[in-house]
Amino acid sequence: MTSLQEETTIRKLATNEKMPYDLLLLADPSVTMINSYLPFSDVYVLETKKQVIGAYVLLKDNDELEIKNIAVNPAYQGKGLGKILLQDAAQRARAGGSKKLCIGTGNSSIAQLYLYQRQGFEITAIKKNYFTTHYPEPIYENGIQCKHLIVLEKSLY
């Protein structure tokens, strides 16, 4: 019996393919914000049996790479696929010569903070009131209002 992880592949989304907004909106509730970084980013999708079940967006900003969005279909969460996506992003960043990889998440994103730190990311900054300033509607997660952006970095060498 093979595991779900063994049955998955990750590939770069082709420019003519449909953007997986259903997944991207799981991590960022604003289409406007998503569309603001997509033109400058590469999108990678995680597939199983030709079905897209996960994705991440990698933005190059000068010498730095940042994961702008990462999500796994809720039906497939808790199976180690987020970890696989993070490892793939780090591998691609390292292969491209980057020395560090950044990711940001909300103060209310408890599971994400746990996962990122378990994968070697360390908190380097907190952007106070980021979500209350940049999003028109309040965001709540785990019963907590998402107000602040927590920035984490992972050294790749």
Image (cartoon, rainbow, N blue to C red):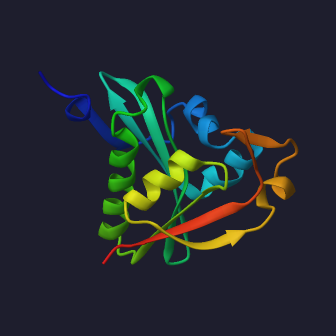
Examine the image and state in which quarter residue 21 appears. Answer: top right
Examine the image and state in which quarter residue 24 appears. Answer: top right
Which residue appears at 40% of the width and 43% of the height? Answer: 82
On the image, the x and y values in percent for residue 88 come to: 33, 53
Q: Is residue 144 visible?
A: yes
Q: Is residue 30 visible?
A: no
Question: In what quadrant of the picture does the N terminus appear?
Answer: top left
On the image, the x and y values in percent for residue 124 come to: 57, 75
On the image, the x and y values in percent for residue 104 come to: 59, 60
Which residue appears at 44% of the width and 61% of the height? Answer: 117
Which residue appears at 35% of the width and 31% of the height? Answer: 47
Which residue appears at 33% of the width and 40% of the height? Answer: 80
Q: Nearer the viewer, residue 48 or 153?
A: 153
The vertical placement of 24 against 68, above or below, is above
The vertical placement of 102 against 51, above or below, is below
Q: Nearer the viewer, residue 89 or 39?
A: 89
